[in-house]
Amino acid sequence: MKVTLSVALDLTASSWIWTTEFTGSSAPAGSRAFRKTLTSPAGKSAIYADIIITTDNFYVLYVNGALIGQRTNTNDWQQAGRFCVGLGPTTNVIAVNGTNEAIGRAGVLAAIQVRYQDGTSSTSISDVSWKATSSLPSGFQSTTFNDVSWPAAVISGTYAGYPYAPIPIPAGPIGVCAGCNAT
């Protein structure tokens, strides 16, 4: 995780990710759990995150166990959601219930920019550093859930690779964080 001054957030460096069930072009239908733990660098305190996310097909997004947002309309999978959420100072958990509606392509695509108290930021993207499991364990979104046995997510596509087209980025985050649009 690289710490820099805040930059515009987009999805171009992000990869579509899924569970190990993904077999080159297809995954079974159903809901899957994804987790990413974000740890602040030494001497830094996180304040908030700007999160851009989409899934093929549905998602429910949690941060530190709290429901942040969701998309349940099949026809909107190429529309990203954008959320601004307050964070704890040191360790934060991003969790996603990603649902593949039917056998076929599946993926979670995300970019997260964490803003620190000193004005710097770091960006985390969806990639193999996320953990993913083919089930939906009870309480997986909690900060105390133990995901140590979960395998790494696998890449199911590139940002704009077939069959995915570039995803439009929403103009600004939804939420109550002061300064999410600050540069």
Image (cartoon, helix red, strand yellow):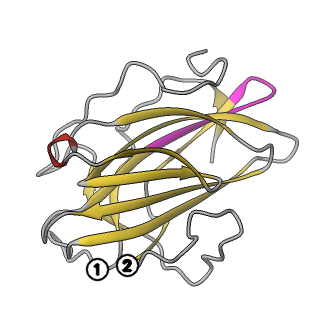
Q: Amino acid at mark 2?
A: Ser
Q: Magenta stretch: give its range.
A: 111-120
Secondary structure found at label 1:
loop
**Numbered circles on residues, count:** 2
Q: Position of residue 12 (x, y in %)?
A: 34, 38
* Residue 134 circle label: 2
Most extreme residue toward the bottom is 149
How many C-alpha atoms fall within 10 Å of the one at disc 1: few (<14), some, or many (≥20)?
A: few
Q: To which residue does mark 1 refer?
A: 21
Residue visible at 11% across and 51% down in the picture: 163
Tell me if residue 156 can be seen: no
Mark toward the viewer: 2 or 1:
2
Mark 2 element type: loop
Whether residue 55 is situated above or below residue 140 in the rendered picture: above
Left or right relative to 123: residue 29? left
Q: Are marks 2 and 1 in contact (CB under 8 Å)?
A: yes
Q: Give me the residue at 20% from left, 72% from top.
A: 29
127 or 35, which lies in front? 35
Q: Relative to 29, say whether 14 is above or below.
A: above
Vertical relation: 135 (above or below) 57: below
The x, y position of residue 147, in whole percent, is 60, 76
